[in-house]
């Protein structure tokens, strides 16, 4: 009787260890697969974590519907697989995904509405909008009949719209200085000051909190100080990384455009008659499936080049194509930094070639007008 109980306990222990081992191997991505010679082999597999904005989209792997976002697909054979994410009312998202043994490839698909909504953000006139580095404020010239001058509109928070986002007047026109006729606005890195160039070429340094302006006799020196502060922060970050000196030099170039998360930068490279737009990713560790460097797209160097700004998630770029200044029209698209899923967001009248992302990424901000010869205003295009 004692021996029988001992055998039962031993057998139960062996079964428990076996089940635990199998569960561990399964959770680690191992699967039993049949080879061509009909032998059974224990092979490593990978996983895909498929997310989408908005959520609740259908996930197809190699043409087969498997689940809905946000979910993880396990037991995938290592290699390249086609992932397609579909949601009614949105443009289909598709990408070839590299799956690696025992690793999870994270994918977040930014879905774009089939019918983006155009809504006014201002109604009293706007010109030359310039976004702050944090993407949370937009400064612009306003010819408002009551308080013409320079205004700032907050972009953070919910409900970015004409009725919820109230612009504040930074400084108003005076009989002597017509700020609203200015040529350009530039933000300081700490977003406490604006450098404004007037119509006659005079520069004014504006203290936003005080609403006070003073003539700047050395605007380039001030801009250089601002740039040096940014460069120092980036230099400290870059020097810690094990990357080629060529990349460090590129990263510090004044022509380089950094992403909102300050971990990626966009640059161009001339290749004979072509111009390559490339993104270098400095993230450590690099997300599974992402490359350190990507060619986003290539253009003919002799052709007009698109205007580019970063999308809020730092994994997409906003392109504005067309001769906006001459034609007062342009095409605005969203493209992933690996060159995939280029999706048109807007194709109509544009009065300014810079287009910006809202901090939440649910809208882009454009400057346009729907009446010939009338005032221009800021509008949002809701992409979801």
Image (cartoon, grey):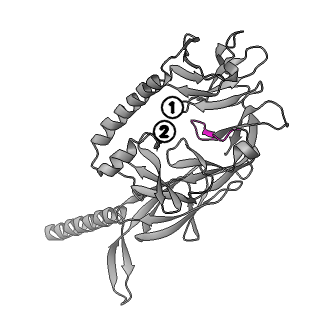
Mark sitting on residue 97: none
Decide if residue 284 is in sight here. Answer: no
Which range is magenta? 352-362
Q: Residue furthest right?
A: 372
Q: Is residue 183 left or right of residue 218?
A: right
Residue 376 figure quarter: top right
* Main SS of residues in magenta: loop
Residue 379 percent coordinates (x, y): 72, 35
Q: Residue at x 36, y 32 (%)?
A: 233
Decide: is 75 above or below 153.
below
Question: Dot 1 corresponds to which residue?
Answer: 134
Instruction: Verify CB contact (< 8 Å) between mark 1 and mark 2.
Output: yes
Q: Which mark identifies residue 260?
A: 2
Q: Is residue 223 visible?
A: yes
Q: Nearer the viewer, residue 380 or 132?
A: 132
The image shows a total of numbered marks equal to 2
Residue reaching furthest to the left: 3
Instruction: Give whichever of discs 1 and 2 has the lower sequence position.
Output: 1
Q: Secondary structure at mark 1?
A: loop
- Residue at position x 79%, y 30% from top? 375
């Amino acid at each position: 009787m004692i021996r029988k109980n001992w055998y039962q306990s031993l057998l139960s222990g062996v079964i428990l260890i076996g089940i635990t081992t199998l569960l561990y191997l399964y959770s680690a991505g191992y699967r039993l697969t049949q080879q061509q010679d009909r032998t059974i082999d224990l092979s490593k597999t990978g996983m895909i974590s498929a997310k989408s904005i908005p959520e609740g989209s259908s996930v197809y792997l190699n043409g087969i519907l498997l689940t809905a976002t946000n979910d993880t697909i396990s037991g995938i054979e290592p290699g390249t697989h086609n992932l397609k994410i579909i949601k009614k009312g949105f443009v289909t998202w598709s990408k070839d995904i590299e799956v690696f043994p025992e690793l999870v490839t994270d994918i977040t698909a930014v879905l774009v509405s089939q019918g983006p909504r155009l809504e006014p953000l201002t109604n009293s006139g706007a010109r030359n909008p310039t976004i702050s580095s944090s993407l949370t404020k937009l400064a612009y010239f306003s010819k408002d009949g009551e308080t013409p001058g320079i205004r700032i509109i907050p972009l953070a928070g919910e409900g970015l719209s004409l009725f919820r986002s109230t612009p504040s007047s930074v400084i108003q026109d005076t009989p002597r200085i017509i700020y609203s006729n200015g040529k350009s606005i530039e933000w300081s890195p700490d977003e406490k000051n604006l450098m404004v160039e007037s119509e006659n070429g005079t520069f004014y340094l504006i203290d936003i909190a005080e609403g006070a302006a003073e003539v700047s006799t050395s605007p380039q020196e001030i801009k250089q100080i601002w740039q040096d502060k940014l460069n120092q922060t980036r230099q400290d970050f870059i020097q810690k990384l094990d990357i080629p000196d060529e990349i460090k030099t590129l990263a510090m170039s004044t022509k380089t455009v950094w992403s909102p998360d300050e971990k990626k930068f966009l640059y161009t490279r001339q290749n004979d008659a072509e111009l390559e737009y490339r993104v270098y990713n400095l993230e450590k560790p690099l997300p599974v499936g992402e490359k350190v460097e990507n060619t986003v797209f290539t253009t003919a160097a002799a052709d007009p080049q698109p205007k580019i700004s970063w999308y809020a998630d730092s994994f997409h770029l906003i392109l504005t194509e067309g001769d906006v200044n001459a034609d007062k029209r342009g095409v605005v698209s969203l493209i992933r930094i690996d060159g995939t899923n280029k999706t048109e967001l807007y194709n109509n009248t544009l009065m300014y070639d810079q287009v910006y992302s809202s901090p939440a990424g649910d809208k882009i901000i454009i400057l346009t007008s729907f009446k010939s010869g009338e005032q221009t205003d800021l509008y949002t295009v809701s992409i979801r």
